[in-house]
């Protein structure tokens, strides 16, 4: 009897909690959400948080079907599926969107941000949001930026102590002209490849090295096929959560609200989780046998000078207004 009453009370409480979602204009929906990393990665964990939050806020009506490890395709393939309306949502690097929205190249500026917190302020601020909304002209809706992180170099040949060591190294870069040009200027033999083909390319020695944040080097098990990790922090990479505009335009205001709120929750979780993991990942990579060296400040300065012309090229493609807006905002942040 007592147990029955308890059950009843619990059912009523659950019903009351779900009420707002039931009253809202929300349909039963299955949302395919693709991403490139493994389920057991900072990206996979944050997608799960997003999925749980969407289920909660929609009273279980909106269901995210999360598909990781690029099983729905590389970033570029998924973007095309979103634009065409064959897939609803994804998360991937802003760098892979530059071919669609050239302004995204701003985030590929080497050494633009000094910390994740600086990046948060710029990405969540006026300029970051303006660039995100430019996707809408191209059939995509940007929801939030997540942190991929500061990128560092790995390779199977030698410790990279300065630009001289990059000379002739076959280095996989993202499919993006800024990255290609940056590493060509540094003397590397830069090879653009989708992330989904990277592990095999490293394993078969089709390329000698690559660059990604510690978290990814760990979660994608690159330490199994890469001996050397050289700390450069040469660029901060954002991820961006996007939706198909074709699909988004057919959603009700309440449904969009659920997705936007859940996206904000996932963003806050993801940045915290990624930063906490990055600190531990480096130690783990050492434990897994990687030989780690920090590129000296002098050598980093030399790198900066070598790739300075890339900045002018980015400024040209994003336009002086956006370029200057970010420079001004960064100056303001750094004054405080
Ligand atoms: C890269 C990126 C990737 C991400 C991921 C697939 O090197 O850093 O890790 O785009 O979403 O391609």
Image (cartoon, rainbow, N blue to C red):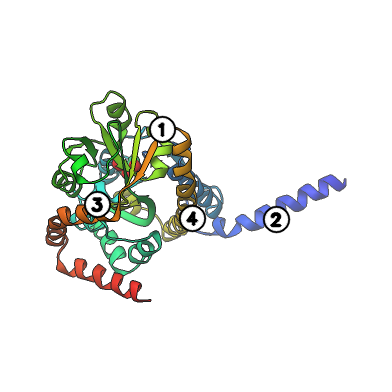
Viewer-side label of 2, 1: 1
Label located before the other in sequence (1 or 3): 1
Closer to the camera, 71 or 296? 296
Q: Which residue is disc 1 drawn over?
A: 221
Report the number of discs: 4
Q: Position of residue 119 (x, y in %)?
A: 35, 61
Closer to the camera, 49 or 192? 192
* Disc 4 and disc 2 in contact, CB within 8 angstroms: no
* Disc 3 and disc 4 in contact, CB within 8 angstroms: no
- Residue at mark 3 to residue at mark 4: CA–CA distance: 30 Å
Viewer-side label of 4, 2: 4
Q: Which residue is disc 2 drawn over?
A: 13
Above or below — where is 168 with respect to 43?
above
At horizontal 53% and vertical 48% (from top left) the residue drawn is 52
Viewer-side label of 3, 4: 3
* Disc 1 and disc 4 in contact, CB within 8 angstroms: no
């Amino acid at each position: 009897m007592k147990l029955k009453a308890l059950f009843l009370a619990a059912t009523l409480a659950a019903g009351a909690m779900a009420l707002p979602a039931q009253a809202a204009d929300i349909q039963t929906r299955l949302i395919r959400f693709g991403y490139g990393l493994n389920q057991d990665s900072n990206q996979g964990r944050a997608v799960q948080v997003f999925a749980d939050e969407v289920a909660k806020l929609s009273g279980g009506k909106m269901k995210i079907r999360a598909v990781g490890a690029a099983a729905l395709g590389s970033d570029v393939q998924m973007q095309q599926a979103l634009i065409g309306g064959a897939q609803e949502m994804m998360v991937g690097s802003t760098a892979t969107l530059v071919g669609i929205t050239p302004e995204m190249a701003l985030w590929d500026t080497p050494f633009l941000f000094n910390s994740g917190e600086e990046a948060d302020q710029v990405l969540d601020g006026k300029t970051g949001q303006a660039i995100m909304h430019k996707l809408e002209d191209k059939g995509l809706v940007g929801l939030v930026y997540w942190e991929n992180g500061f990128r560092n170099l790995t390779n199977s040949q030698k410790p990279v102590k300065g630009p001289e060591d990059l000379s002739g190294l076959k280095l996989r870069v993202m499919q993006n002209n800024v990255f290609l040009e940056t590493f060509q200027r540094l003397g590397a033999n830069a090879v653009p490849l989708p992330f989904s083909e990277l592990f095999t390319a490293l394993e078969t020695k089709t390329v000698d090295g690559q660059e990604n944040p510690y978290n990814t080097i760990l979660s994608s098990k690159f330490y199994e096929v890469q001996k050397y990790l050289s700390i450069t922090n040469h660029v901060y990479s954002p991820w961006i959560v996007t939706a198909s505009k074709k699909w988004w335009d057919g959603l009700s205001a309440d449904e969009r609200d659920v997705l936007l709120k859940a996206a904000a929750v996932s963003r806050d979780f993801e940045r915290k989780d990624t930063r906490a993991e990055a600190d531990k990942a480096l130690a783990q990579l050492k434990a897994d046998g990687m030989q780690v060296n920090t590129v000296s400040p002098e050598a980093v300065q030399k790198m900066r000078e070598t790739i300075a012309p890339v900045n002018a090229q980015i400024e040209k493609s994003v336009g002086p207004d956006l370029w200057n807006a970010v420079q001004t905002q960064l100056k303001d942040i750094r004054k405080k």
